[in-house]
Image (cartoon, rainbow, N blue to C red):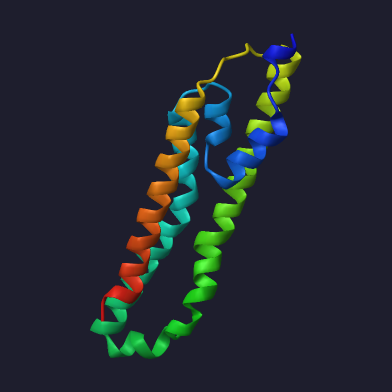
Amino acid sequence: MTENRKNPWAAAIASFFIAGLGHVYYGERWVKGAVFFIGRFAGVVLFLLYATIYNWVISHSAYFANMLPPVRYFFFVYVLLAIIPWIFVALYDAFIVFSTGRKMNAGEIPFKKNNSLTCWIYAMAIFLLTIVFTFLNYLFFFGTT
């Protein structure tokens, strides 16, 4: 029985930092982890949408430009639309992974073997996608003048 045990804490911590990695560690489909990755970046997409609409309105209407808050408040909007949802989705992902690991160790759900190569490939893919999204975010805000 000891070879059929998973470490729920390690999986939860891994899933907190790399979206969905704990699900892949448990031998579940990588699609489930990818859903959590998409959920984390939903806040970034919302913020980019807000910034695009804000920029368009400011550049096309002097009336609205005087009514809307200045650009320096973008950081607070970024925290509300991107960082806080990221933290909540990451905590939820870690909680789901932790409870799945405990249930798997208790025999309540079937044990699934994982492939460590799949875990590494998934982690590297998520890491590279994060770098790409960060670079695109940087280009969106600082690359255009």
What residue is rendered at 26% in x and 81% in y? 145
Taking 66 as reference, is 130 above or below it? above
Taking 121 as reference, is 64 above or below it? below
Q: Please say whether residue 139 is visible from this viewpoint.
A: yes
Residue 91, image quadrant: top right
Camera-nearest residue between 85 and 10: 10
Taking 60 as reference, is 11 above or below it? above
Camera-nearest residue between 96 and 65: 96
Taking 104 as reference, is 97 above or below it? below
42 on left or right of 61: right
What residue is rendered at 51% in x and 75% in y? 75
What residue is rendered at 52% in x and 22% in y? 28
Q: Please say whether residue 108 is visible from this viewpoint.
A: no
What residue is rendered at 45% in x and 52% in y? 41
Residue 2 placed where, x, y %?
74, 13
Residue 10, image quadrant: top right
135 on left or right of 105: left
Furthest residue toward left: 60
Residue 83 placed where, x, y %?
55, 60
Image quarter hosting the N terminus: top right
105 on left or right of 83: right
Residue 133 placed where, x, y %?
37, 56
Residue 61, image quadrant: bottom left
